[in-house]
Image (tube, helix red, strand yellow):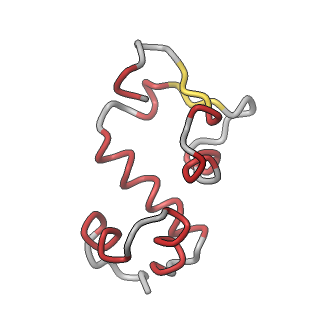
Amino acid sequence: LVALTDDGEQVETTQLPGYLQHVAPSLHAHDDQTVPASEVGSDLASLRREVMLATLRECEGNVSQAARRLGISRSSVYRVLGRQPGLR
């Protein structure tokens, strides 16, 4: 969605897939629950990484739990984030 928006256009959390809607508010706390596209950036790899990190924070570093919430495998989390201290 971000790559398809014009400068200044906002992506509403309701436009995100369901599995991302619970993470979106923790990425940027806006009162109206919107995130300007220019703040998120157009780099989808960075967005994917930020979503994974936010989910890991919510799961207190538990990779298995975060992967389940995101609907991906643990190996996908490790592949994107690498082996970082604090991941379990």
Q: Position of residue 22 (x, y in %)?
A: 64, 53
Residue 60 drawn above or below residue 27: below
Residue 29 in percent (x, y) is at: 65, 41
Q: Quadrant of residue 16?
A: top right
Q: Position of residue 83 (x, y in %)?
A: 28, 78
In the image, 82: left or right of 14? left
Residue placed most toward the observer, 32 or 65: 65
Q: Is residue 83 above or below residue 33?
A: below
Image point (37%, 73%), residue name: 73
Question: Does residue 73 appear left or right of residue 37 in this picture?
Answer: left
| Quarter of the figure that contains the N terminus | top left
Most extreme residue toward the right, as rendered?
31
Q: Identify which residue is drawn at 55% across, 47% down.
A: 27
Which corner quadrant holds the C terminus? bottom left
Q: Residue at x 34, y 26 (%)?
A: 3
Nearest the viewer among 61 and 67 is 67
Q: Nearer the viewer, residue 85 or 7?
A: 7
What residue sits 30% from the left and 67% below the top?
Answer: 81
Q: What number of labels is visible?
A: 0
Left or right relative to 37: residue 34: right
